[in-house]
């Protein structure tokens, strides 16, 4: 994963990964990604490739649609149960929460401190309580 974060997805080949890891190509997908501030592979791929690679763009859009659908479903359920205000529009709020989540992953890479990240999250959820 360090090769992706250092060189970028486009500039890192399978041969590079085999050389760096010593793992055979078929086993690369079984490796565990280390924790840290390297970011989400999906977000990094979106930032680097989605605009220039239609296949990556479609994969990213599909993942984002799934995130939005799941959030929308949860918000509709919460609204039905009276857990969030009736004026909340689940579809619009789901889109905002998905975008906020993606943004948090980008901002988080800069290590802005817990207070900044909490402020972003608090703002995103402020109208739900």
Image (tube, rainbow, N blue to C red):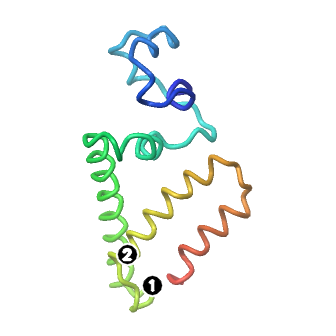
Label 1, residues with CA under 10 Å away: few <14, some 14-19, many ≥20: some
Task: Reply above or below: 9 against 105.
Answer: above
Name the outermost residue toward the bottom: 86
Q: Residue at x 43, y 63 (%)?
A: 98
Q: Position of residue 65 (x, y in %)?
A: 30, 59
Image check: 19 left or right of 14?
Answer: right
Task: Reply above or below: 48 against 90.
Answer: above
Image check: 116 left or right of 106?
Answer: right
Q: Position of residue 58 (x, y in %)?
A: 26, 47
- Looking at the rendered structure, the secondary structure element under dot 2 is helix
Task: Give the camera-side residue of 41 and 72.
Answer: 41
Q: Position of residue 54 (x, y in %)?
A: 26, 43
Task: Reply above or below: 114 against 37.
Answer: below
Label 2, residues with CA under 10 Å away: few <14, some 14-19, many ≥20: many
User: Mark on residue 35?
Assistant: none
- Looking at the rendered structure, the secondary structure element under dot 1 is loop
Q: Quadrant of the rendered structure where residue 14 is?
A: top left
What residue is pinned by disc 2?
Answer: 75
Q: Position of residue 47 (x, y in %)?
A: 45, 46
Q: Residue at x 57, y 80 (%)?
A: 126
Q: Quadrant of the rendered structure where residue 73 is?
A: bottom left
Task: Reply above or below: 102 against 129.
Answer: above
Q: Are marks 1 and 2 in contact (CB under 8 Å)?
A: yes
Quadrant position of the C terminus in the picture: bottom right
User: Mark on residue 84?
Assistant: 1
Q: Quadrant of the rendered structure where residue 18 is?
A: top left
Q: How many marks?
A: 2
Indicate which disc, 1 or 2, sits on the residue closer to the N terminus: 2
Task: Give the camera-side residue of 52 and 84.
Answer: 52
Q: CA distance from mark 1 to mark 2?
A: 8 Å
């Amino acid at each position: 994963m360090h090769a992706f974060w250092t060189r970028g997805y486009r500039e890192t080949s399978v041969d590079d990964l085999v050389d760096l890891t010593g793992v055979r190509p078929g086993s690369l997908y079984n490796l565990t990604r280390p924790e840290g501030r390297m970011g989400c592979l999906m977000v990094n791929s979106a930032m680097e490739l989605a605009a220039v690679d239609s296949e990556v763009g479609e994969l990213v859009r599909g993942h984002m649609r799934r995130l939005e659908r799941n959030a929308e479903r949860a918000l509709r359920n919460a609204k039905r149960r009276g857990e969030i205000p009736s004026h909340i529009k689940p579809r619009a709020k789901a889109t905002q929460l998905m975008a906020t989540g993606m943004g948090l992953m980008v901002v988080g890479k800069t290590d802005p401190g817990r207070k900044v990240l909490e402020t972003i999250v608090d703002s995103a959820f402020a109208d739900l309580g």
